[in-house]
Amino acid sequence: MTPTLPSQVDNSSSEPSWIGVLAGIFFRDKRLLVMVLALIFVAGLSSLAIMPRMEDPVLTARTALVVTRMPGATAERVESLVTEKIEASLRDVFEIDEISSVSRPGMSTINVTLLDSIYEADAIWAKVRGKIEDSIALLPPEASRPVFDELNTRAYALLVGLTWDQPGPPDYRVLRRLAADLQDRLQNVTGTEVVDRFGDPGEEIEVRVDPIRAASMGLSPAMIAQRVANYDAKGTAGQLRDQPISMLIEVENQLDAVARISNIPIAAVDGKDVRLSEVSTVSLGVPSPLPVAANLDGREAVVLGALVRKDYRIDAWTQSVDKLLAEYELGLPQGIVLDRLLTQNDYVAERLDSLMWNLIYGAAGVAAVIFVMMGWRSAIIVTLALPLSSLMVLFGMRVYGIPIHQMSVTGIIIAFGLLIDNAIVVVDEVKVAYEKVRVPSRQ
């Protein structure tokens, strides 16, 4: 007699479950079983090929700082004139969990924390920015514009530094301009979200007045400074009205170039304009003392940090960046060294390799134990449960938009421990039920 399936066993006490029905369908239709297995393999492998990879999961930014400067003001004035005004405006945002502030002489710092139930914080931060803009009209004129800084908890995918490697004081103008050029190139790489620059002191235009020459023309340093400030017309020069178009006209005479500042007229002698360069020396340099600085192994440097979009594969992005850095390094002048401080892809590859070897070792160990205890047929079925389940999980992560990172990988490894127990129990139950059916049939 031909043995029947476990789902076909006469059991009047209960109806066959849907799992038994599916098992019967796949047992009878081998082509359907092969097609489903092939679909699982294709879906899982394609998901593994295109899913984004990163070291850590992207956490929702729920904390931000609002910094406002008020030079010369005491802490009490900063508290009453700046901090309280901004806090009162922010209290209208109901999604804010906590507002804490510190008022120091000349500076107000407000810490804003959102509720833990907020997962889409972009819209809330937009409301917060709007409330900060509304509070600007309430601040005193001597207060600066509030600076909103959203505190992200993401790690940089790449950290590189341009280091001054030659004797003598470093030329920060060369370092920062090379760093700015590299920053633009990194920003243009597909998948780059933002590139930040650290240790860049910036530039300033320095005017050194010759006191003897200025005094001979009846000019004092204060008078020269006032006339230079008056020449910097940041206001609107007029308005062009041509229905339906209306445009503001501004004079392009901002103080942003050495030549332009040198040509500022500051006095008239014998009917001729006296330019600023005639009574002073105008030069471009860096601030002294340096407002910020970076140091790599005792050498001055400017450091760049790049973030990758959370929906992009970090290994593909790293390959593109490696080619760019190799080409850029060939064009660096002598005495400037490009140092790679951190490449996140190395850590990501290490964790993925760890997952792969854990799966291989786990599958081999389970197969050996099941082969000895339950036979080769049961060993094959239980062992195949690992890769099939892995591919199904990868496809599910792709559907739900979960990238591959150390938290998701850790969760997969933990789940496999529970999966093996279930697979062994199911195979054992099926084997026992099959034996019960086969023994009567032989009799």
Image (cartoon, rainbow, N blue to C red):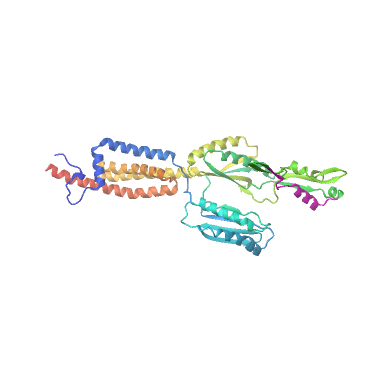
Residue 202 in sight from this viewpoint: yes
Residue sticking out furthest to the right: 270
Residue sticking out furthest to the front: 243
**Is residue 220 found inside the magenta-colored segment of the image?**
yes
Residue sticking out furthest to the bottom: 76
Is 367 located above or below residue 13 in the figure? above
Q: Quadrant of the N terminus?
A: top left
Residue 402, percent across and down?
A: 43, 46
Q: Quadrant of the C terminus?
A: top left
Is 38 located above or below residue 373 in the figure? above
Please give left or right for residue 126 compared with residue 255 in the image.
Answer: left
Residue at (78% x, 48% y) in the render: 208
Residue 360 in sight from this viewpoint: no
Q: Nearer the viewer, residue 136 or 327?
A: 136
**Is residue 376 found inside the magenta-colored segment of the image?**
no
Please give left or right for residue 140 compared with residue 380 in the image.
Answer: right
- Tag count in the figure? 0
Residue 429, percent across and down?
A: 23, 48
Q: Nearer the viewer, residue 162 or 334?
A: 162
Q: What segment is highlighted magenta in the picture?
A: 218-240
- The quadrant holding residue 83 is bottom right
Residue 249, percent across and down?
A: 69, 43
Please give left or right for residue 378 compared with residue 103 in the image.
Answer: left
Q: Nearer the viewer, residue 113 or 357?
A: 113
Residue at (63% x, 63% y) in the render: 80
